């Protein structure tokens, strides 16, 4: 299953990481899910509520998730993923990213931001049905 998004949305999520450097940025991806793809139609920036370790952790407040769901519903869209940045670290999921991932069937997009500049962006699909069998699977990003 690929992650499809416009060049503009792709650039927006990468720019968000540059703007929040040296802290992690985070956000929500709204779109449509099919058997073949997750098609991103809108990006919602979220505030990183992790004040204890914002340089290497992120958290999206439940109120922002609810607001994003409501916004999506109005447009006929669903939450299809999340994104965040890794300042001066690879665009690979960490054990904390994995432990805190709970939205099965959603994309988790990570952009490495080195010295303030966005570098590699990767996506991982959270598969499984429970905490016991969940896994991150590398996901192809298709820019439309």
Image (spheres, rainbow, N blue to C red):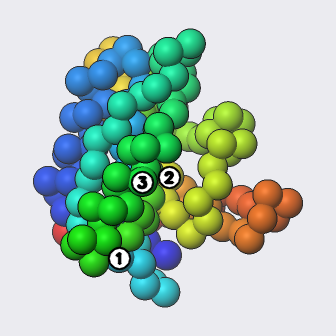
Where on the picture, by quarter, is residue 80?
Answer: bottom left
Extreme residue in the left direction: 8
Earlier residue among tags 3 and 2: 3
Alpha carbon distance from label 1 to label 2: 15 Å
Alpha carbon distance from label 1 to label 3: 17 Å
Circles 1, 2 touching at the beta carbon (< 8 Å): no
Earlier residue among tags 1 and 2: 1
Left or right: residue 101 versus residue 85 is right
In this figure, which residue is indicated by the disc labeled 2?
108
Q: Is residue 68 above or below residue 97?
A: below
The answer to whether residue 39 is visible is no
Q: Is residue 1 above or below residue 98?
A: below
Extreme residue in the bottom direction: 35
Which numbered marker is on residue 98?
none
Q: Is residue 109 above or below residue 32?
A: above
Q: Position of residue 143 (x, y in %)?
A: 25, 63
Which class describes the residues within 10 Å of circle 1: few (<14), some (14-19), or many (20+)? some
- Helix, strand or loop at label 2? It is strand
Which numbered marker is on residue 66?
3
Residue plotted at (50% across, 52% down): 108
Q: Position of residue 7 (x, y in %)?
A: 17, 57
Left or right: residue 36 versus residue 4 is right
Please name which of the two marks, 1 or 3, marks the residue nearer to the observer. 3
The answer to whether residue 71 is visible is yes
Residue plotted at (34% across, 38% down): 46
- Helix, strand or loop at label 1? It is strand
Q: Position of residue 72 (x, y in %)?
A: 30, 66
Circles 1, 3 touching at the beta carbon (< 8 Å): no
Which numbered marker is on residue 32?
1
Out of 62 and 140, give the one closest to the viewer.
62
Out of 71 and 85, give the one closest to the viewer.
71
Earlier residue among tags 1 and 3: 1
């Amino acid at each position: 299953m690929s992650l499809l998004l416009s060049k503009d949305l792709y650039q927006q999520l990468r720019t968000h990481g540059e703007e929040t450097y040296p802290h992690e940025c985070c956000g929500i991806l709204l779109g449509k899910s099919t058997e073949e793809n997750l098609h991103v139609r809108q990006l919602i920036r979220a505030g990183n509520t992790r004040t204890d370790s914002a340089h290497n952790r992120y958290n999206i407040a439940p109120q922002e998730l609810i607001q994003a769901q409501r916004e999506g519903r109005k447009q006929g869209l669903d939450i299809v993923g999340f994104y965040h940045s890794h300042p001066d670290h690879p665009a690979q999921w960490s054990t904390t990213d994995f432990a805190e991932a709970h939205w099965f069937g959603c994309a988790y997009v990570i952009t490495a931001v080195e010295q303030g500049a966005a570098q590699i962006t990767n996506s991982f699909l959270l598969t499984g049905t429970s905490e016991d069998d969940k896994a991150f699977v590398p996901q192809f990003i298709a820019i439309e």
